[in-house]
Image (tube, grey):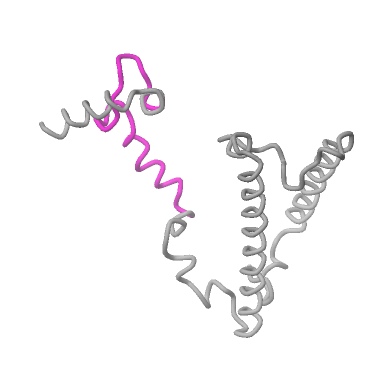
């Protein structure tokens, strides 16, 4: 749906209500989680850092990561404002104005992700020959836990055949 040129009214009211409810629950949960520790609260720190980039960083690097996060958020807001302005001036949706943003690149086939997964699901399996697996080992375990020397030796063997 276009922001300024219609389409949002076609979204079912139940979807809007669900979105508002979910957002409200997340906001209340966040406020309750910081209520007792307001002095140690850092804006933007939601506790989600699966690769521990922030935890391993020193004070200067943490400041740099915070600034990068703020600047990326600002850039995203400016981009959306420009999209809305373009839609208003052209009286057409951004998908029609700049189709290259939606038909090319890594997200071009996001609507067909199920087909892509089905097509390539066997590609990184032990049976495919691409992943070196020990007896009884799964492909993910082999990729994550195998030594690089062992994998390199296996690939050299496969490529030389």
Q: Residue furthest right?
A: 36
Span of residues in magenta:
111-140
Classify residue 91 by image quadrant. Answer: bottom right
Residue located at (40% from left, 23% from top)? 145
Quadrant containing the C terminus is: top left
Q: How many marks?
A: 0
Residue 38, image x and y in percent? 87, 40
Q: Is residue 126 left or right of residue 2?
A: left
**In the drawing, does residue 135 fall left or right of residue 100?**
left
Please report the residue visible at 64 percent of the width from the left and 71 percent of the height from the top.
Answer: 2
Quarter of the image where the N terminus is located: bottom right
139 inside magenta stretch = yes
Q: Is residue 135 magenta?
A: yes
Q: Quadrant of residue 68?
A: bottom right
- State the image coordinates of residue 66 (x, y, percent, origin top left): 66, 50
Q: Quadrant of residue 114?
A: top left
The residue lying furthest to the left in this view is 161
Residue shown at 86%/39% (left/top)?
Answer: 39
Residue 48 vertical placement versus 137 (above, below): below
């Amino acid at each position: 749906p276009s922001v300024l040129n219609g389409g949002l009214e076609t979204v079912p009211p139940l979807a809007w209500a669900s979105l508002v409810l979910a957002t409200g629950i997340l906001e209340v949960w966040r406020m309750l989680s910081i209520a007792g520790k307001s002095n140690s609260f850092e804006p933007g720190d939601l506790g989600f850092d699966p690769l521990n980039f922030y935890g391993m960083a020193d004070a200067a690097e943490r400041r740099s990561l915070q600034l990068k996060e703020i600047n990326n958020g600002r850039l995203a807001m400016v981009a959306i404002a420009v999209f809305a302005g373009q839609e208003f001036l052209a009286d057409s949706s951004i998908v029609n104005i700049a189709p290259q943003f939606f038909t090319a690149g890594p997200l071009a086939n996001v609507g067909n992700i199920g087909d892509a997964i089905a097509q390539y699901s066997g590609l990184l399996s032990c049976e495919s020959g691409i992943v070196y697996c020990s007896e009884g080992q799964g492909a993910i375990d082999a990729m994550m836990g195998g030594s690089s020397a062992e994998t390199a030796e296996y690939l050299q063997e496969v490529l030389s055949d």
